Image (spheres, rainbow, N blue to C red):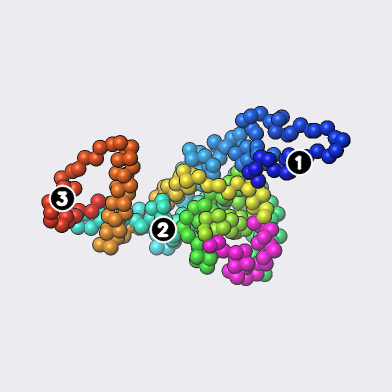
């Protein structure tokens, strides 16, 4: 495929026929593709800098739609345990106890991340600007259960709890990771941008299912097969799952790449969304075992930086903490 001298592009002409000019000769130098195959960079839309699923500086769609509700004083429906409109108490670190939320951009907390993704989907449905739909995602035409859907299935917006329950069931049964949830949201917003479709009460389950199906195959080394999802959703067949995956990929124009900067943007936007909706990540006391792991990780990172600096010709200066006195050195504090 990458060989410019392949037999497909440069086959010998038949006898008695003049040599035809190669196709590459008509392409500008900066647009030349090897073997006449278009590179994915050549398929990028002209307004790619406005696409949040591609450009790290473009604002995410779910944040824009959540601001509509927040500006109007409307937030997600609270449970009976949160009827009092008071922000929950937040634990603060002290000299004796340090509180850390067990979630980082490289290792997000699964439960909290799935909750935030479900909340983002909730605002997508609630504050949609139109009702554009496609047949492949219509739940009445392609039901997920044998019972089908109610006659007014497209009239009522699902609550955050209902969306979270659906996503959590898939993630728990398929043993998917928190990173896969973030990739799912990226693919969902890329679909809304590329296919010009809206996520509505009539199609949200199948759109989310297609995004999860694709994200799990791209992100996880041991991906869940389509037939495995048929074991989770008992009434769906593998042919329907295959067709859903195929059309989802075509609508994404087979662009499944997610830059690390875009992934980080979605992670931090989800945290911002959680904070604005009193869905903050709970802090846990820093245990001795966790502190030792953090210290070990920081020392590995420090050694890598020092080694790189020495390679670049920088001189290493030792502080008093690193001066060996012959006695075993003890760490007086752990900075995390």
Q: Earlier in the sequence, mark 3 or mark 2?
A: 2
Q: Which residue is mark 3?
A: 324
Magenta stretch? 222-245
Q: Nearer the viewer, residue 196 or 102?
A: 102
Magenta part mainly helix, strand or loop?
Answer: helix
Q: Nearer the viewer, residue 27 or 127?
A: 27
Residue 35, image x, y percentages: 68, 40
Q: Secondary structure at mark 2?
A: loop
Q: Earlier in the sequence, mark 1 or mark 3?
A: 1
Q: Which residue is mark 2?
A: 109
Q: Earlier in the sequence, mark 1 or mark 2?
A: 1
Tell me which residue sits at (15%, 57%) in the image. Answer: 328
Q: Nearer the viewer, residue 25 or 144?
A: 25
CA neighbours of label 1 inside 10 A, class few (<14), some (14 to 19), many (20+): few
CA neighbours of label 2 inside 10 A, class few (<14), some (14 to 19), many (20+): some
Per the rendering, the mark at residue 137 is none
Q: Nearer the viewer, mark 1 or mark 3?
A: 1
Q: Is residue 309 left or right of residue 29?
A: left
Q: Is residue 23 above or below residue 156?
A: above
- Tell me if I can see residue 306 in this picture: yes
CA neighbours of label 3 inside 10 A, class few (<14), some (14 to 19), many (20+): few
Q: Is residue 311 left or right of residue 113?
A: left
- Tell me if I can see residue 287 in this picture: no
- Is 289 magenta? The answer is no
- Is 240 magenta? The answer is yes
Q: Secondary structure at mark 1?
A: loop
Instruction: Give the CA separation, mark 3 to mark 2.
Output: 40 Å
Q: Which residue is mark 1?
A: 11
Residue 282, image x, y percentages: 35, 58
Q: Secondary structure at mark 3?
A: loop
């Amino acid at each position: 495929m990458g060989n410019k001298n392949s037999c497909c592009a440069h086959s010998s002409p038949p006898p008695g026929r003049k040599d035809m000019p190669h196709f590459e000769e008509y392409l500008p130098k900066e647009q030349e593709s090897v073997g006449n195959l278009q590179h994915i960079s050549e398929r990028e839309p002209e307004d790619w800098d406005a696409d949040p699923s591609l450009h790290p500086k473009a604002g995410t769609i779910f944040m824009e739609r959540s601001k509509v509700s927040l500006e109007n004083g409307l937030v997600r429906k609270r449970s009976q345990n949160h009827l009092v409109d008071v922000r929950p108490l937040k634990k603060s670190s002290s000299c004796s106890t340090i509180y850390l939320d067990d979630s980082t951009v490289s290792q997000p907390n699964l439960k909290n991340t799935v909750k935030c993704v479900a909340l983002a989907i909730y605002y997508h449905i609630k504050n949609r600007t139109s009702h554009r739909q496609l047949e492949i995602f219509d739940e009445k035409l392609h039901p997920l259960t044998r019972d089908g859907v109610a006659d007014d299935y497209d009239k009522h917006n699902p609550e955050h709890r209902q969306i979270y329950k659906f996503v959590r069931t898939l993630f728990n049964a398929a043993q998917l990771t928190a990173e896969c949830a973030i990739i799912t949201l990226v693919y969902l917003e890329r679909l809304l941008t590329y296919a010009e479709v809206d996520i509505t009460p009539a199609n949200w389950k199948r759109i989310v299912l297609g995004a999860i199906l694709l994200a799990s195959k791209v992100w996880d080394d041991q991906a869940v097969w389509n037939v495995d999802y048929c074991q989770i959703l008992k009434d769906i067949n593998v042919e329907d799952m295959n067709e859903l995956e195929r059309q989802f990929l075509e609508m994404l124009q087979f662009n499944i790449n997610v830059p690390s900067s875009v992934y980080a943007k979605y992670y931090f936007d989800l945290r911002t969304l959680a904070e604005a909706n009193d869905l903050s990540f709970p802090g846990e006391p820093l245990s001795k075992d966790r502190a030792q792991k953090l210290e070990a990780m920081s020392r590995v990172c420090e050694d890598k930086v020092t080694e790189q600096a020495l390679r670049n010709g920088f001189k290493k200066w030792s502080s008093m903490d690193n001066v060996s006195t012959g006695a075993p050195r003890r760490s007086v504090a752990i900075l995390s």
